[in-house]
Amino acid sequence: MMTDKLVILAGGASSRMKQEVAGKTALTKAQKEQANKRSKSLISIGNSNRPFMDYLLYNAKKAGYKNIYIITGKQNDLFKSFYGEKDMGNRFNGLTINFAIQTIPEGREKPLGTADALYQAMNQFEELKKSSFTICNSDNLYSVNALRILREFNATPNALISYDRDSLDFTEDKIAKFALMQFDDHQLLTDIIEKPPLDEVHNYVDREGKLRVSMNIFKFDGSLFFKYVKDCPLHPIRKEKELPTALLNMIKDHPDATTGIPLSEHVPDLTSKDDILIIKKYVEAIDLSHW
């Protein structure tokens, strides 16, 4: 089913962004201060001095999305200063911006993970339980093409972009940390493999000879997926409820429900301070002046 809804995960702790950079850095004092204090997606990037989130929203609008659900923590005043003071129904450059709050359980210092974030958002916005939506990270700049492909996809209830690992312009160390995905001959997702041993990686190439990874951009049928985010178990090591875990549990019950859509392109990423100047060259090609 085609959708006009995009859910953006922006409630993480941004702990890696707050870590100090080893050696000298070309970041300005203002950039360092923002990196240490702001959510990653609100760091000013590019010549417009607007938040990184603007560029993701711009691509989302070009891809045809109209209703945006930004999941934040309880302290979201800065988000609201940029995108609207109301909890729901804010108008921003032709988009409707809604805010969902991911609360932190008692006894924890950090949020409970991405599956928990979506679960809380779906409880706050009942329409997400009844319709299809795309969901993605706030610190990746997904292309208009990737966003549009998922918005329009309707062959199966759920889908995700399966990126060609060789197309990602990251360091080898960073790429080696990405989980690999497996698909059957019909491009249906069958498994997600975290950090396979290097001597076994070749076992996971697809029929095109490619290794496929997820950059956390999915399309879900809310009526089907809600049960699995609600019942998602904690990851045994990270102790968080994560979307890939919920997704794997769903395909055990519904093996024909999730298609991987192959795509070969880079996905700019804003994880650490080192990424700020790297990503600047990507966003400067996007003209926000007519917004």
Image (spheres, rainbow, N blue to C red):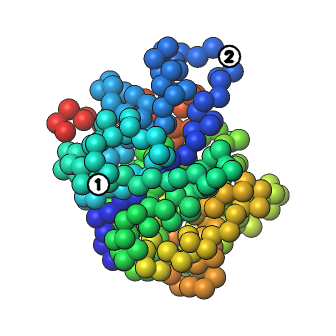
Location of residue 198 in the rendering, given as x and y in whole percent from the top left corner: 80, 54
Q: Which residue is mark 1?
A: 88
Mark 1 falls on what kind of element? loop
Say the numbered circle drawn on residue 144. Answer: none
Q: Which residue is mark 2?
A: 23
Viewport quadrant of the C terminus: top left
Residue 92 seen from this side: yes
The correct choice, above or below, for 248 with respect to 284 in the image is below
Location of residue 16 in the rendering, given as x and y in whole percent from the top left corner: 63, 36
| Rendered image quadrant of residue 196 | bottom right
Name the foreground residue: 143 vs 208. 143
- Residue at 40% across / 28% down in the picture? 44
Disc 1 residue type? Met
Residue 282 seen from this side: no
Which circle's residue, 1 or 2, is located before the other in the chain? 2
Disc 2 residue type? Gly
Q: Is residue 180 left or right of residue 71?
A: right
| Rendered image quadrant of residue 173 | top right
